Image (tube, rainbow, N blue to C red):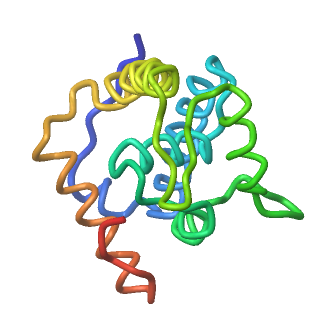
Amino acid sequence: MTTTRQHSREQLAAQPIGHWSRTAAGLAIGGLRTALAQENLTQPHWWTLNHVAGTPGTWTRPALTAKLAPYDDQHTDFDTDFHTVYDDLASRDWPTETTNGLTLTEAGEAGRLRAHDRNAKVHATMRKGIDDAEYATTIDVLRRIGANLGGNGDLP
């Protein structure tokens, strides 16, 4: 187990936000991607499964792609082809699709829950020693910094 040294408020306030937010984001995202890969899933798969599970039968492929594409940072020279993601999930028989939208099958929900459990372990490790109030403050500060710099401070 790694021990984190304590520092004064003055020392912490002088630290570069870009360094620490990028470091934390890289490690958190990397941990989640590793956990999802154990189920042969990517983050776009995960996002798709959660949106479809949250409101079954309401997301069409084009609407879901429009919702999820802004969160895609897995590209270098190309964006994620969400149709390939949907086709991959369909090849596993995880969703059913009608003109109204996508719905998870029993197998799809079981896969989503397995991935959820893996992600929950990453979140538990990430939040070790950090209570809900500290975590909420951190999220609030980061979203306000983003808004101050011209970004969208609303919750996704």
Tell me the residue at 53%/40% (across/down): 46
In the displayed image of the protein, which residue is found farthest to the front?
Answer: 99
Q: Which x, y percent locates residue 116?
A: 41, 26
**Considering depth in this image, is 78 or 51 the residue closer to the camera?**
51
Q: Which x, y percent locates residue 8?
A: 22, 48
In the displayed image of the protein, which residue is found farthest to the right?
Answer: 77
**Considering depth in this image, is 14 or 147 the residue closer to the camera?**
147
Tell me the residue at 62%/20% (across/down): 39
Residue 52 vs 101, above or below: the answer is above
Give the left or right position of residue 46, taking residue 9 as reference.
Answer: right
Q: Which x, y percent locates residue 138?
A: 26, 55
Q: Quadrant of residue 137?
A: bottom left
Q: Quadrant of residue 79?
A: bottom right
Give the left or right position of residue 107, taking residue 130 as reference.
Answer: right
Tell me the residue at 37%/63% (across/down): 14
Q: Which x, y percent locates residue 95?
A: 56, 37
Tell me the residue at 58%/72% (across/down): 66
Residue 136 vs 120, above or below: the answer is below
**Considering depth in this image, is 17 or 80 the residue closer to the camera?**
80
On-image quarter of the N terminus = top left
Residue 27 vs 75, above or below: the answer is above
In the displayed image of the protein, which residue is found farthest to the top?
Answer: 1
Give the left or right position of residue 28, taking residue 74 as reference.
Answer: left
